[in-house]
């Protein structure tokens, strides 16, 4: 039997829309406060101006929301917010994404809010307190806030321009190194063999043919990052060098954010599959942070990006009520 809710206007949705997938978390108001109602995962997004970008955004919202409703229930919402990869805060992309959210969910525009996924991660991790979030998933971005509420971001300008410090970067660097090995510019090693075997490639020509296919995406390179981390754990010198270079770029961005916001010994939080799940890369990031930001400390975040999106949705909901 499908469950229904007497007052669905008190159910809010928070979306964390990355390039690989989109998560939706539903929260319901009761006399005891806000409680998670359900959570689900759908397809990922791309830049809104990329080919099919708007439709990918719509489908990410639709599919993740459908997966989040418990027991197959779907009903109108009270408010919703999304933090989406590629939605730059303060640009024309922000109202476009908000309008798309309004369109998909059939909510009044004033009860929808869209921003970059780095902003929802920051809000989820620190609430209104100062701190810096380092996000390293398929892509990377670093964003922080100081005691005055001022915010600053570094990185995250798209894989064609600025992917250093991400899973994409690890995979991209590794494939470049593998070609240098195949050419004889570097000594051959297990890193190339692991990568090429995973991709089903026997020659450099096979690899070139693979990556020029129209459906080859940055996420395909990001999926190679665990192999780089594994090779580094086995002592592969080239893999270790790749991790160190990428970690340096991430720490450099964090240091720039701290300097801009005048945060001398900031609290840091880590988000994203690369920095959280790749053991050797995480260690390399820690070492790079110690060099760039001595005195900084890692803390456990108050919540994640979905929690940050839900906080923004609550802001919209409460404004509407008043």
Image: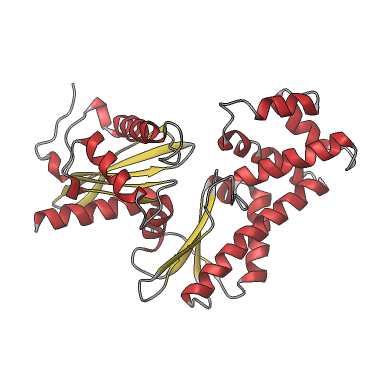
Looking at the image, can residue 135 be seen? no
Q: How many marks?
A: 0
Q: Is residue 60 left or right of residue 311?
A: right
Measuring from the top left, give residue 36's x and y in whole percent.
28, 44
Q: Residue at x 46, y 37 (%)?
A: 50
Q: Where the N terminus falls, by quadrant?
A: top left
Measuring from the top left, give residue 153's x and y in whole percent.
47, 62
Q: Nearer the viewer, residue 206 or 133?
A: 206
Image vertical order of residue 61 relative to residue 303, above or below? above
Measuring from the top left, give residue 263's x and y in whole percent.
49, 76
Q: Nearer the viewer, residue 244 or 39?
A: 244
Q: Nearer the viewer, residue 151 or 263?
A: 151
Q: Quadrant of residue 40?
A: top left
Q: Residue at x 65, y 28 (%)?
A: 212
Q: Quadrant of residue 159?
A: top right
Q: Residue at x 73, y 38 (%)?
A: 175
Q: Residue at x 26, y 43 (%)?
A: 99
């Amino acid at each position: 039997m499908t469950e229904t809710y007497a007052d669905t206007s008190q159910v809010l949705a928070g979306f964390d829309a990355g390039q690989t997938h989109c998560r939706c978390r539903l929260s319901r108001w009761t006399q005891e406060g806000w409680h998670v109602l359900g959570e689900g995962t759908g397809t990922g997004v791309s830049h809104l101006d990329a080919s099919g970008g708007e439709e990918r955004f719509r489908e990410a919202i639709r599919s993740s929301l459908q997966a989040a409703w418990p027991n197959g229930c779907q009903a109108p919402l009270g408010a919703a917010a999304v933090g989406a990869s590629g939605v730059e805060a303060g640009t024309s992309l922000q109202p476009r994404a908000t309008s798309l959210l309004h369109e998909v969910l059939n909510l009044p525009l004033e009860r929808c809010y869209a921003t970059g996924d780095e902003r929802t991660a920051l809000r989820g991790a620190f609430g209104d307190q100062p701190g810096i979030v380092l996000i390293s998933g398929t892509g990377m971005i670093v964003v922080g806030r100081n005691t005055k509420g001022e915010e600053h971001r570094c990185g995250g300008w798209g894989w064609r321009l600025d992917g250093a410090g991400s899973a994409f970067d690890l995979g991209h660097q590794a494939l470049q190194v593998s070609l240098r090995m195949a050419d004889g510019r570097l000594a051959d090693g297990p890193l190339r063999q692991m990568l090429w075997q995973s991709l089903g490639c026997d020659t450099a020509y096979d690899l070139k043919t693979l990556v020029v296919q129209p459906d080859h995406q940055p996420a395909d390179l990001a999926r190679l990052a665990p192999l780089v981390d594994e090779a580094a754990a086995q002592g592969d010198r080239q893999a270790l060098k790749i991790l160190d270079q990428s970690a340096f770029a991430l720490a450099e961005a964090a240091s720039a954010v701290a300097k801009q916001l005048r945060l001398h010994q900031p609290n840091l939080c880590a988000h994203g599959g690369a920095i959280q799940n790749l053991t050797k890369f995480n260690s390399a990031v820690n070492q790079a942070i110690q060099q760039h930001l001595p005195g900084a400390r890692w803390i456990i975040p108050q919540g994640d990006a979905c929690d940050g999106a839900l906080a923004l949705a609550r802001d919209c909901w409460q404004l509407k009520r008043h």
